[in-house]
Amino acid sequence: MLLTVWFYFCLVILTVIAATAVIIVSIFDSKGSISLKITKLWGFCLIKCIGVKPEVYGLENIVPGQPYIYAANHQSFFDIFVLLAVLPPTVKFLAKIELFAIPLFGQALSRAGSLPVDRSNRQAAMKSIDRAAKAVRQGSSIIIFPEGTRATTPQLLPFKKGGFVLAIKSGQPIVPVSINGSRFIMPRGGRRVRSGPLRVVFGQPIPTDTYKTKTKDALMSLLQEVIEANYDPDYPHNLTSSESTARGCAKVLTQAP
C-alpha cells in the first residue's frame, strides 16, 4: 500500500515538473530533442521510484539514428514508462486523442511531438496515420501498441491494422517489442502498484518496403508471431518459458517475403 501511495505521489509531482519543463523548453527547442530527453527522464524516474530494473535484450538490433516504428504488446499503463526509459530519446507516441485533453499533460504531449489519433473517426484517424508516416520518413521514431488498448487477460489481444498501414506508408522498419511482467506491476483495472522483475525483448527490425497496404495482414501476422515468441504471460513466475530472445526473432523473420 505504501508503495502504491509513493508511486502516485511521484507520478503527479514528476508529471507536473516534466510537462512544465517540456512546454517551456519547446519555445526554443524547435527540433524537440531536449523535450524528448525530458520525456525519457520522466519515464526513467517513474520506474526507478518503485525500484523496477528492467532486463533489456535485443537493443543491439537497433541502429542509432535509424527511424523505426516500435510495436509493443500492451498489458499495463506502466509499459509507457518502461519504453521511454529504455529507448533512445528520439521516440514519440501515436496516442489516443483523449490524452491530449488532459490539462498540462496534453499540452506537453503535443509539444513533445506525439500525435493524436481519434479512433472514433476513421477519416481523422487515417489523417493521423499519414502525419505519423511522414514524421517517421523525416527521422522520428514512433511507438505504437497494435492491440489498441491494454489487455485485461494474459494473452495478446487481436492486432488492429492502423499501425501496419503506418509502417508500410513510412517505408521504415517495424521493431517487435515484447514486454514481460508489467501486468503484475500495474495491471489494468487495478490501482495497486507492485515492484517486481520486468523483461523487455527487442526483436530484429522487420523491413516494410516489401509490403503493400493490401498485404498488411501478412506483416501483421509476422509481427504478432515474433512478439508472442518472446512474450511469457506468466513472467516472472514461469522463467523457463521466457527464455526466448532475439535469436527466436531471427528465426521467425526467415518467413518474411
Image (cartoon, grey):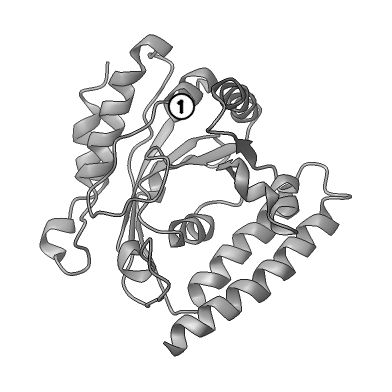
User: Which residue appears at 17% of the width and 69% of the height?
Assistant: 237
Q: Looking at the image, which residue sits at the far left? A: 240
Mark 1 element type: helix
Q: Give the side of residue 257 with respect to residue 66, left or right.
A: left
Q: Residues within 10 Å of mark 1 (few under 14, many from 20)?
A: some
Please say if 6 is above or below 227: below
Q: Point out residue 187 in the picture as x, y percentages from the top left corner.
A: 35, 64
Q: Give the side of residue 93 with respect to residue 146, left or right.
A: right
Asked whether residue 252 is in view, the answer is yes
User: Which residue appears at 83% of the width and 42% of the height?
Assistant: 30
Asked whether residue 212 is in view, the answer is no
Which residue is nearer to you in this view: 225 or 100?
A: 100
Please say if 234 is above or below 204: below
Which residue is nearer to you in this view: 101 or 174?
A: 101
Which residue is nearer to you in this view: 235 or 146?
A: 146
Q: Point out residue 255 in the picture as x, y percentages from the top left corner.
A: 20, 23
In the rendered image, the quadrant that contains the C terminus is top left
Q: Point out residue 38 in the picture as x, y percentages from the top left corner.
A: 69, 60
Q: Amino acid at mark 1?
A: Gly
User: Which residue appears at 22% of the width and 35% of the height?
Assistant: 225
Residue 243 found in image quarter: bottom left
The residue singled out by tag 1 in the image is: 162
